[in-house]
Image: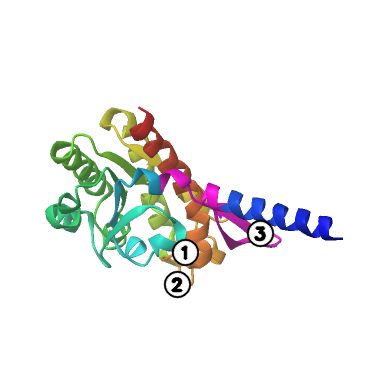
């Protein structure tokens, strides 16, 4: 009996150590058939220690970066209600003051919903990227797709979002940034609207929405940071 007890303790200790080694954090994420456990995080993030600035509007502002991206040295530079033009005006204080190694950009939905044309949004996003490259040549930039919205914003909004996303995906190689398609992870199974499970107001992600984004964005962060560390 004592031998079995010691064996059980050793096994428990091994499993606990393995959990710490991998730096994993578990959360519950809604799935098509109830809740499923999601493991995320990267143990190399804390060892690396580089700073990552998340730049954007309220969708970024409302995101608890410590909860969804544990171990990442992250700065939340999201401002509720901001636009691509507004972001361009605050780059010094919101980005360069932190001297980041990576910038994660998510912007454009406030522009589109307020009537700014797609060409202007695309140009502003590309200008933000170019500005970062100009001020911080070694900094890597990740550009998230504009997220889908609820159907009550209208079919025109959905089409305009798709137009911006297509353009940003097409320009990624030439403009030297990593484009991440989060739109697909958030949209409903049918159509191009935001899955109702992922938002309470049709625009901002709820906990389930941020959890749906997390593995997609984490994969991009792992890849980009891995290239910084290992070349």
Disc 1 residue crowd, few under 14, some 14–19, many 20+, Cα 10 Å: many
Q: Is residue 17 left or right of residue 154?
A: right
Which structural element holds mark 3?
strand
* Mark 1, residue position: 150
Residue 90 magenta = no
Q: Are marks 1 and 3 in contact (CB under 8 Å)?
A: no
Relative image position of residue 112 (x, y in whole percent): 30, 57
Q: Residue 201 bears which disc, if any?
A: 2
Q: Which residue is mark 3?
A: 36
User: Around disc 3, counting alpha carbons within 10 Å, would you say few (fewer than 14), some (14 to 19), or many (20 or more)?
Assistant: few
Real-space Cα distance between discs 1 and 3?
A: 24 Å
Q: Provide residue 44's location: percent of width, then percent of height.
A: 43, 43
Mark 1 falls on what kind of element? loop
Q: Mark 2 touching mark 3, by CB under 8 A?
A: no
Q: Residue furthest front?
A: 2
Picture disc at residue 164: none
Can I make out residue 190 in this image?
Answer: no
């Amino acid at each position: 009996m004592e031998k079995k007890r010691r064996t059980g303790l050793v096994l428990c200790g091994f499993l606990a150590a393995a959990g710490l080694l991998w730096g994993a954090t578990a959360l519950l994420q809604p799935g098509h058939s109830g809740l499923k456990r999601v493991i995320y995080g990267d143990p190399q993030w804390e060892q690396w220690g580089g700073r990552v600035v998340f730049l954007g509007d309220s969708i970024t502002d409302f995101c608890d970066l410590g909860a969804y991206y544990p171990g990442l040295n992250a700065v939340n530079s999201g401002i509720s209600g901001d636009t691509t033009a507004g972001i361009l005006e605050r780059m010094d204080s919101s980005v360069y003051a932190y001297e980041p190694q990576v910038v994660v950009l998510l912007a454009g939905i406030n522009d589109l919903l307020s009537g700014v044309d797609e060409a202007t949004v695309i140009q502003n996003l590309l200008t933000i990227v170019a500005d970062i490259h100009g001020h911080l040549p070694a900094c890597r930039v990740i550009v998230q797709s504009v997220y889908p919205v609820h159907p009550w914003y209208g079919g025109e909004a959905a089409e305009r979002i798709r137009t911006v996303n297509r353009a940003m995906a097409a320009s990624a190689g030439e403009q030297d940034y990593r484009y991440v398609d989060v739109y697909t992870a958030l949209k409903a199974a049918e159509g191009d609207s935001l899955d109702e499970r992922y938002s309470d107001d049709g625009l901002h992600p709820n906990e389930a929405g941020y959890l749906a984004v997390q593995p997609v964005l984490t994969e991009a962060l792992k890849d980009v940071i891995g290239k910084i560390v290992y070349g």
